[in-house]
């Protein structure tokens, strides 16, 4: 068996683990973060369970860090008191980014982790099978239900050879993106194996599994071997280690091979993580901003290399340079190893150990700036600046750019600095607050920003509405519902955050949706790639969106649609995408029968009155009136969820019924 099969077979509670079959998997641990966690907590509360039925649950505060108004601080207080009351650990703001802390303190090889953040697979670097999902799926897992997913294909990624100096783990995953694109991982788990994995440390492995999210993968993971043992020993957690490697005769559904000796420094150009080129091919472009950190590249080693490069050097006068370390442990260990002083001396800005500029929580680039970041996403506008020009590269490439003021191949910096880990990392968990021993003493504090959970009603048997917007391929959740310092504080307030749906792509969208009352979205392929934010479904739902018809969907967003009762439908003939324009009226009759028989058709007309008055035979095709065949890939369980009006209703119903 391969490692994925070993973990899944030990956790399988429902279904057959054959690619494409729906399986139910027992969840050992969950994580939430503040930006998705307030909803997840409200959803858990709505399920009426006293405390999580998993072995460990934790909520981190790492995204909504700026306190420019009362909202974020109120959310933090809500989360802290909620966690204390409901048996959940709470990681205080200032402790660091959820995925980095989870790797350091809570990763356990062989366990299944569910997290309300798309980069939860970061833990796959330590041999955990970790899935990013919407908050509601985490809430349901905390209620003791299995995690349901279509069994992905397991793609073995065989690493051979050894990385050369200045070529890094980031370049391995950028190479994966270059070859496979942002949709290359949909329906797949990437399991890394082969002789090359032995030379890659756990934090480096985590850079790779982290950015599996950008490939659209269900998750990514590495074996648990001596390298994993060494990492856990540095964390004082040897007892959590178990060996977990593929059997010698393990097979995979597909294979990819990367020869590490042949890789060179790579960079993703604006504005997609798969727009990858060798750094050498784009060198010389003037650079205005460099940011190093985020959950992708903020380990001790990452920042120590940056620090060593900056010894005796200065940041280029034009460049605004900042670092956001991954965790308090990283900051403390850097301090002990004299890793911060050269960054400061060189003219670097040290930001809080939190998500920061990665999600537009500050550090938005200026107009026309070229911003080079060691982060994982460069979707349009994600930085907080419309028409931004964000490039993604390794910390090594970033620091080379910061020093020269131009895109620079880091191999031009000379000898690769020697960086050793200290014998042990500093492990101080005092900013992780355990749940209250007597929950009855805790009052949950709900500031005015915490609005009640929106409800979704059971689906009608027919859907009718205007096409409110037609979008192209690879639309990310950052486009559907932007993040950034202005919008993120509204994550607990759906009426308020709904004002921002498609804000940068189509500023008229909200007004149009409100005028129409009900409607649909037409999309190309891989709709909803990127984050796990269920707000990218909740807010459109609040504005009356009933269905999305796309060429294909990204996994987490598709599940979020189902979980809130919005039907994800697909064109049977992808070329029909051309035929349905924005403003058309669409009617889908007898949805129930159509979903059951997979024989759904949409009646599309440009002339709204003809459908509303129902004067014409809808089967009669004309230029103005089309019949568009649709399909879906909902399982029986998902169909029931959609008809129940979402997973919350469905879970309540099925729990009552036993
Ligand atoms: C992201 O990187 O896009 C986020 C912000 O971490 C999201 C979660 C969110 O939108 O709150 C993610 O990756 O799921
Ligand atoms: Fe935070 Fe960025 Fe990582 Fe998302 S990708 S968890 S915003 S650091």
Image (cartoon, helix red, strand yellow):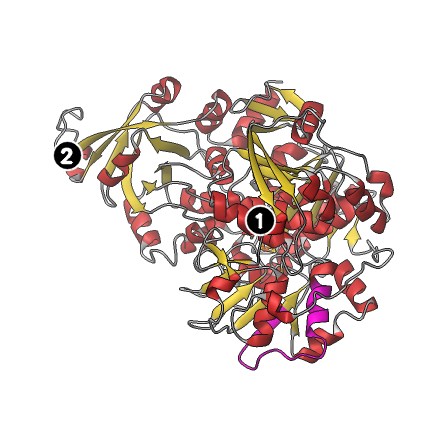
Ligand 1 within 8 angstroms of badge 2 C-beta: no
Residue 507 drawn above or below residue 636: below
Residue 22 drawn above or below residue 101: above
Residue at figure coordinates x 30%, y 34% from the top left = 574
Dividing the picture into quadrants, the one containing residue 577 is top left
Distance Cα–Cα, label 2 vs label 1:
52 Å
**Residue 531 appears in the picture as rendered:** no
In this picture, residue 544 sits left or right of residue 46: left
Q: Quadrant where the C terminus lies?
A: top right
> Over which residues does the magenta segment extend?
303-322
Which-is-in-front pick, marks 2 and 1? 1
State the image coordinates of residue 607 (x, y, percent, origin top left). 15, 39
| Residue position for label 2 | 610
Q: Quadrant where the N terminus lies?
A: top right
Residue at figure coordinates x 45%, y 54% from the top left = 275
Q: Residues within 10 Å of mark 1 (few under 14, many from 20)?
A: many
State the image coordinates of residue 41 (x, y, percent, origin top left). 63, 43
In this picture, residue 45 sits left or right of residue 594: right
| Residue position for label 1 | 173
In this picture, residue 648 sits left or right of residue 330: left
- Identify the element where label 2 is drawn: helix
Residue 67 covered by magenta stretch: no
Residue at the limit of the structure toward the bottom, as seen here: 317
Q: Residues within 10 Å of mark 2 (few under 14, many from 20)?
A: some
Q: How many numbered marks have been drawn onto this rendered protein structure?
A: 2
């Amino acid at each position: 068996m391969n490692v994925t099969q070993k973990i899944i077979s030990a956790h399988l509670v429902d279904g057959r683990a054959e690619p494409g079959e729906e399986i139910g998997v027992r969840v050992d641990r969950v994580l939430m973060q503040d930006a998705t966690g307030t909803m997840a907590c409200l959803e858990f509360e709505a399920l009426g369970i006293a405390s999580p039925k998993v072995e460990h649950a934790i909520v981190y505060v790492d995204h909504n860090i700026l306190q420019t108004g009362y909202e974020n601080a109120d959310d933090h207080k809500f989360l802290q008191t909620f966690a204390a009351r409901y048996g959940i650990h709470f990681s205080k703001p200032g402790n660091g980014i959820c995925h980095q802390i989870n790797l350091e303190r809570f990763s356990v090889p062989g366990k299944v982790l569910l997290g309300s953040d798309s980069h939860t697979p970061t833990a796959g670097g330590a041999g955990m099978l970790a899935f990013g999902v919407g908050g509601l799926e985490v809430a349901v897992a905390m209620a003791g239900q299995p995690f349901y997913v279509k069994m992905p294909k397991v793609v073995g990624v065989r690493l051979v050879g050894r990385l050369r100096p200045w070529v890094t783990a980031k370049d391995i995953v950028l190479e994966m993106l270059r070859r496979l694109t942002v949709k290359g991982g949909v329906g797949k788990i990437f399991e890394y194996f082969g002789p090359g994995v032995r030379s890659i440390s756990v934090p480096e492995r985590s850079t790779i599994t982290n950015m599996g999210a950008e490939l659209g993968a269900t998750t990514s993971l590495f074996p648990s071997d001596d390298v994993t043992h060494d990492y856990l020993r540095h964390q004082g957690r040897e007892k959590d280690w178990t060996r977990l490697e593929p059997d010698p005769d393990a097979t995979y559904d597909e294979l990819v091979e990367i020869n590490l000796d042949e890789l060179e420094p790579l960079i993703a150009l604006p504005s997609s993580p798969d727009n990858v080129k060798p750094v050498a091919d784009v060198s010389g472009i003037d650079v205005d901003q460099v940011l190093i950190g985020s959950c992708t590249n903020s380990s001790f080693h990452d920042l120590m290399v940056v620090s060593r490069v900056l010894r005796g050097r200065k940041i280029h006068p034009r460049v605004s340079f900042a670092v956001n370390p991954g965790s308090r442990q990283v900051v403390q260990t850097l301090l002990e190893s004299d890793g911060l002083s050269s960054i400061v001396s060189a003219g670097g800005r040290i930001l809080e150990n939190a998500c920061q500029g990665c999600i537009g929580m500050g550090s938005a680039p200026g107009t026309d700036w070229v911003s080079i970041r060691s982060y994982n996403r460069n979707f349009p506008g994600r930085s907080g600046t419309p028409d931004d020009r964000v490039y993604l590269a390794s910390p090594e490439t970033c620091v080379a750019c910061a020093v020269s003021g131009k895109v620079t191949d880091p191999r031009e910096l000379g000898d690769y600095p020697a960086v050793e880990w200290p014998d042990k990392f500093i492990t101080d968990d005092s900013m992780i607050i355990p749940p209250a021993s007597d929950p009855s003493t805790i009052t949950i504090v709900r500031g005015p920003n915490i609005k009640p959970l929106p409800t979704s009603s059971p689906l009608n048997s027919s859907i009718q509405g205007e096409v409110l917007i037609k979008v192209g391929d690879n639309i990310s959740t950052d486009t559907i519902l932007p993040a950034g310092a202005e919008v993120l504080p509204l994550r607990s307030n759906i009426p308020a955050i709904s004002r921002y749906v498609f804000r940068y792509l189509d500023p008229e969208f909200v007004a149009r949706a409100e005028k129409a009352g009900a409607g649909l979205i037409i999309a190309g392929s891989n709709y909803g790639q990127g984050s796990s934010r269920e707000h990218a479904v909740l807010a459109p739902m609040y504005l009356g969106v009933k269905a999305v018809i796309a060429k294909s969907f990204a996994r987490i967003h598709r599940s979020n649609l189902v979980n809130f009762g919005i039907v994800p439908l697909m064109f049977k003939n992808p070329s029909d995408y051309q035929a349905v324009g924005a403003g058309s009226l669409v009617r889908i009759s007898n949805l129930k029968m159509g979903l059951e028989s997979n024989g759904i058709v949409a009646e599309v007309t440009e002339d709204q009155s003809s459908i509303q008055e129902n004067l014409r035979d809808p089967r009669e095709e004309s230029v103005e009136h089309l019949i568009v065949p649709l399909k879906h890939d909902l399982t029986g369980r998902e169909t029931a969820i959609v008809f129940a009006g979402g997973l919350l209703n469905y879970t309540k119903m099925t729990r009552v019924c036993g």
